[in-house]
Amino acid sequence: MEQGIDCREKGGCRRGGWTHIRVMVLICIYLTSLVAYPVLADEQAVPQAAPQKILVLHSYHEGNVWTQSINEGIESYFGDRGMEVDLFIEYMDTARISEPGYSRKMYELYRVKYSDIRFDAVIVADDAAYQFMQVRHKDLFPMSPCVFCGVSDYQQGDLDGWQRCTGVVEAYDVRSTLDAALKLHPDTSHLVVINDRSISGISNKNRLLEILPAYEDRVRITFLEDLTMDELQEAVRSLPDDTVILMMTYNIDGAGDYYEYEESIALVSSASRVPIYGVWDFYLGEGIVGGKLTYGADQGRIAAEITGRILDGEEASSIPVVTEVPTHWMFDNHQLLRFGITASALPDDSRIINQLPGIIPVTVQVFWGVIAAFTILAGAVVILVANIIRRRRAEDALRRSEEEFRHLSVLQHEALEQIEANMEQMAILNDHIRNPLQAIVGLVDLDGGPMAEKIFLQAGEIDAIINRLDQGWLESSKIRDFLQRHHPREKQEPRKGSDA
């Protein structure tokens, strides 16, 4: 009985222990799930933020160089800061399309196209889009803050009553550009302004009329407007040499024909004999000397920076309009050389394009240094050519000398042979004369008689002649020995008829 009781007690203890363990495990799993579930729920409940939507409304068409540079400024700002934005870009194309009712049609298009999209911000570029949004902002995008850029005709009261709007003014620096032009061309007495009648052109003229009175006592001012391109080129060709041209916007000529910026400046520059200055970067490298230039990329970058502040929570109306924008002294080296302008005469901090790689800006010192270098190089070339001519002449003289030497050598050889032949003949002749003469003198001496004295006298004269021949033979022998020492001849076959 005791063992049975013990077994039941032990068995009961084992079954009870396993039950408690199972309960504890289930409780731990339950508690763990309670802790983990809120974390998982929170992760699932907070989706990743979608890119913020921004509409960029341009006054001009796609491909316009100014418009492209504004886009580059906007995109570079967001890209450099890693901000994910979804850009919707529209081009109103107002420079090429100006028919009545066009603005209303664009409004209807955007109202239908973007009725289901709420933009986090709208950026408008240049005067036409700015004026369009002034009227249509509340109807098209009432909940979207607006940022403008590239606006040249901004007035202080434009934002009165226009809520949730700010931006950056296109503050080009005409005054500094004109001052620099007149300083670089001190004989200027005539200023010609080329401008069109577009919305931007009208804004340009309004701003110019504010500052040009300060120059009326220094130069005579003429506006060239409402001219066809042919008429404009003809007018430019006839300008006197004491003229400077200020090139403002010229997209639409008097006949209504459209020209891109780079086209209009190229045509005007090709007809001009006088320097042309400007205030925008899109003319640089196309025909202007230079100026204090405004860049479209700066306008786009500043507008994007303001937009970023709005996206971060600032109210658009609380951000002041930017009226001071960076401008840059920029000049074209081709035009500087064309009009004889040195880099040292340019304003401080000027940058020059179209310079040769590795070449420093053209100063007076550099200019004369280059001239001196070319002079030295030309002198070296002259000296080299003279040396070549002298060398060729020396080679020709040496060649002639060698030929003469060879000819003289032949003559010397022939003379030596002739001397030896003469000496041989003289030796034979001496023997053939002296021996018979001695025999004759001996016979006369034996015989005597009245003729003996005369014969002795003639024999003495003949003997004197033979002695002179002997002396000549000795001199010839010396000459032969000299020639043989200084001009050894080649071994030759013995002469026929000689004893050798």
Image (cartoon, rainbow, N blue to C red):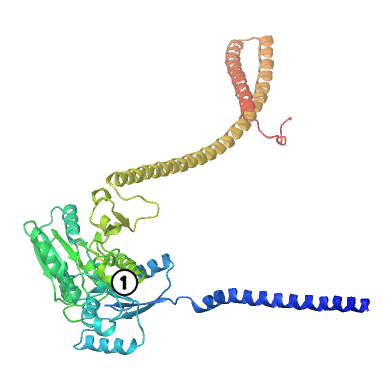
- Residue 289 in view, yes or no: no
Question: Label 1 belongs to which residue?
Answer: 65
Crowding near the residue tagged with mark 1, few <14, some 14–19, many ≥20 C-alpha atoms within 10 Å: some
Q: Amino acid at mark 1?
A: Val
Whether 440 is drawn above or below 95: the answer is above
Q: Nearer the viewer, residue 438 or 167?
A: 167
Quarter holding the N terminus? bottom right
**Picture quadrant of residue 478:** top right
* Whether residue 315 is situated above or below residue 461 in the rendered picture: below
Residue 446 spot, x, y in % from top left: 69, 10
For residue 461, side relative to residue 443 (left or right): left
**Furthest residue toward left:** 217
Secondary structure state at the residue bearing disc 1:
helix
**Figure quadrant of the C terminus:** top right
Judge by depth and name the residue closer to the eye, 192 or 370. Answer: 192
Residue at figure coordinates x 11%, y 64% from the top left = 210
